[in-house]
């Protein structure tokens, strides 16, 4: 079964995968984390939805947060009324560095979404800006809303 | 001291001094801001995910020992504020901080103050 767009939370978390534990670590771990960086403000909405869907009648517009991914890390395919996004983000410790805090997740995902109508796959555009992927998917011509004019009898 | 946002003073929304009420006091939606922190011999390296934030919407400030990151994400459904404040106990060279925003990820390098760097002591023959 494919995901419907109503399920906005079905997008991989790019961070705080281990949030509940990070928030209440053991005393020893806490001391370790606080050795260099003590953090006294926790974000209010861990795992907030990062997927957004709009329908302006002509196009479906899908926006997804993909921080740290470049064009080469993303694969998008469209068939009929199904769009599939694949991507991967690796999180590596820089050479010669030790880890003090790790909240950003390595992510690998393959998500398929069923659109409310067929789209014109040739006219789909994808842009990636400031870590946000925007997919514009025009409805197929035969499913474009048609204006029917009423003639006086 | 604003490191990343030279136009901050012109934008009344972009500056939030560290001692002012945090953004959560307003109605703006708080967005999740995960960070990685690494330590090298000469620097602390902080990576933070701020998808949707443009360079002019990001303010990074350091006033020892406080490091504050605040990013504003535009209008619409995704609008909101990313903000976190850290206390940095390591001695940092205030002039040795650099920030770079790529693909929605902030890379912040904080150079350790010279006197805290590991020093190699030469042993001379007596």
Image: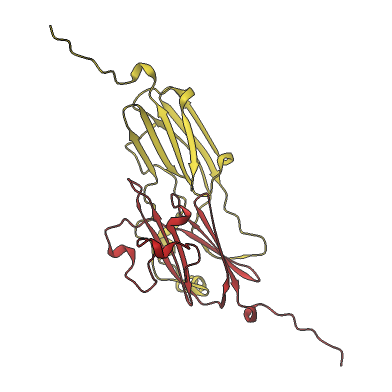
Chain colours: A yellow, B red
From the viewer's perspective, is residue A88 above or below residue A28?
A: above
Q: Extreme right residue here?
A: B125
Q: Extreme top residue here?
A: A153
* Residue A51 at x, y percent in the picture: 39, 42
Considering the image in quadrants, where does the C terminus of chain A appear?
top left
Q: Is residue A49 left or right of residue B2?
A: left
Q: Extreme front residue here?
A: B10
Residue at x-position 42% and y-position 32%: A136
Q: Is residue A138 left or right of residue B44?
A: left
Residue at x-position 59% and y-position 39%: A72
Residue at x-position 36% and y-position 74%: B19
Q: Is residue A53 left or right of residue B96?
A: left
Q: Is residue A58 left or right of residue B112?
A: left
Q: How many marks?
A: 0
Considering the image in quadrants, where does the N terminus of chain A appear?
top left
* Residue A39 at x, y percent in the picture: 44, 70
* Residue A22 at x, y percent in the picture: 44, 63
* Residue A132 at x, y percent in the picture: 46, 44
From the viewer's perspective, is residue B51 above or below residue B58?
A: above
Q: Extreme bottom residue here?
A: B126
């Amino acid at each position: 079964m494919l995901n419907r767009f109503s399920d906005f939370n079905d997008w991989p978390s790019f961070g705080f995968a281990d949030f509940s534990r990070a928030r209440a670590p053991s005393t020893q771990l806490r001391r370790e984390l606080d050795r260099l960086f003590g953090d006294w403000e926790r974000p209010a909405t861990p795992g907030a939805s990062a997927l957004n869907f709009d329908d302006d009648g002509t196009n479906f517009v899908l926006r997804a947060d993909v921080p740290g991914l470049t064009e080469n890390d993303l694969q998008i395919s469209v068939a009929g009324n199904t769009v599939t996004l694949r991507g991967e983000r690796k999180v590596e410790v820089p050479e010669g560095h030790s880890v003090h805090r790790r909240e950003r997740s390595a992510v690998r995902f393959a998500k398929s979404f069923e659109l409310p109508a067929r789209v014109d796959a040739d006219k789909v555009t994808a842009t990636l800006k400031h870590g946000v992927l925007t997919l514009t998917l025009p409805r197929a011509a035969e499913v474009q809303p048609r204006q029917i004019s009423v003639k006086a009898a | 001291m604003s490191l990343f946002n030279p136009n901050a003073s012109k934008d009344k929304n972009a500056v939030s001094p560290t001692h002012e009420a945090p953004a959560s006091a307003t109605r703006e939606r708080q967005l999740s801001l995960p960070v990685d922190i690494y330590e090298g011999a000469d620097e602390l390296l902080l990576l933070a995910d701020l998808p949707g934030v443009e360079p002019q919407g990001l303010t990074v400030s350091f006033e020892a020992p406080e490091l504050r990151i605040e990013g504003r994400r535009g209008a619409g459904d995704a609008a909101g504020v990313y903000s976190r404040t850290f206390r940095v106990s390591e001695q940092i060279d205030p002039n040795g901080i650099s920030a770079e925003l790529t693909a929605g990820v902030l890379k912040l390098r904080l150079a350790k103050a010279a006197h805290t760097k590991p020093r190699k002591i030469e042993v001379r023959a007596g």
